Image (cartoon, grey):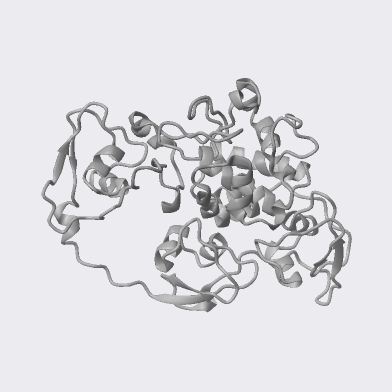
Amino acid sequence: MRKSLKTLVRPNRAHFTVPAALIGTLAATLVATPPEAAPMTSEREPRPHWRGVPATPSVTTHVVAAGESVWSVATAHGLRPADVLAWNGLDWSSVIRPGQVLNLTAPAAAQVAPTPSAPTMMSHTVVAGDTLTGIAQRHGISLQTLFDANGLGWSSVIYPGQTLNVPGVTTAAAVAPVAAPAPAPAPAAPQTAHTVARGDTLSGIAKKYGVTLAAVFEANGLGSGSIIYPGQAITVPGTGAAPAAAATPATPAVAASVDGLDAEQIENARLIIQVGRELGVSDRGIAIALATAMVESWIRNLDWGDRDSLGLYQQRPSTGWGSPDEIRDASRSIRVFYGGPSDPNGSRTRGLLDISGWEGMGFSQAAQAVQRSAFPDRYAAWEGAAYQWIAALG
């Protein structure tokens, strides 16, 4: 079914779009959006094509008129909004006003600035359990620096055996491990076999036994995208006694490992993970729920959307997803997205667990079976980031 910018029609589900007049107001709410998840455009109109910085621009400044935003000004001149923000010393939270003059090209000083010498590089070979966040922390660099050195972003997926550039370091000897495993009572401590129970996760098992998630990955030949099942035996290395009581995770460390999400998004992401655990949903299902919420609402419990769409998943009262108050109940809307036997909507709507064979579908295909979006490929762009959020928050 075709959709346009102003009306997106699909059965049982609506996908919201952002009216042009609201773009400037909403800029402050947008964080961590990858290039693949740019704002939606009509299917009947070509998507904007960013030309980058023109070699010899015909217009170098623009006087802001009433109703204009950085987005509308940039697209009108074929530029990227991020470049216009940078050239004018602005950020996504900045507000522009009528009469304000915007630069449409880089300042002269920036154009003639000498190219800095390339930082010293070393390489890192990805092993099972590695994440981009973990690699950046291990080498003492920012996640964005690692992205820039390898042409990666939040949606990128890394694989064991892959070689990454790590700038700004000179020797591997200076690199500290991500985290030291819990001290063993003896060098040859026996391993423990953990039988997976409903609701278990690899990160939860690692915390339960006081070992690192990377150690559990390595001992079982698993990775961040692996799925575990009730009854499965998981080897826990370096343990010989009963697991210690779970410790409360350190909030500052968690916050540092989810770069790009603000406090509101982190709170909602935690709730999505928590509800998924309570329902016994696999890590893959929780990752789909997180990625879908990012595409639909930037993981924010919105009180607006296309037509009557609301909340984290932009569910619509008019198509049976619940009353406005019910949809704005974040916990309830998450349970409705997951669906299954405990779905508050019963059989009125269909959630992820109600879709036969969803575990065997592609990432975007499974999300699309619930959402029925006009842009189904956007969910897969957040798959890698979703697994990182689970590792950090789950």
**Frontmost residue, 160 versus 111:** 160
Percent coordinates x, y for residue 138 in the rendering: 55, 66
Question: Measuring 87% from the left and 59% from the top, which residue is drawn there?
Answer: 231
Where in the figure is residue 108, as x and y percent of width and height?
A: 14, 54
Horizontally, is 145 left or right of 287 in the view?
left
Q: Residue at image x 17%, y 29%?
A: 99
Quadrant of the rendered image containing residue 228: bottom right
Res 394 seen here: no
Vertical position of residue 110 compared to residue 184: above or below = above
Q: Classify residue 70 by image quadrant.
A: top left
Across and down, in percent, residue 248 comes to 72, 46
Residue drawn where x is 41% and y is 70% of the image: 168
In the image, 38 versus 224, the foreground residue is 38
Can you say whether 283 is above or below 272 in the image?
below
Q: Is residue 269 above or below residue 68?
A: below
Whether 199 is drawn above or below 142: the answer is above
Q: Is residue 131 left or right of residue 31?
A: right
Q: Residue furthest front?
A: 1
* Residue shown at 60% from the left, 73% from the top: 160
Q: Left or right: 384 with respect to 321?
A: left
- Residue 145 percent across, percent down from the top left: 42, 62
Q: Nearer the viewer, residue 301 or 114?
A: 301
The residue nearer to you, when weighing 383 against 372, is 372
Residue 148 visible in the snapshot: yes
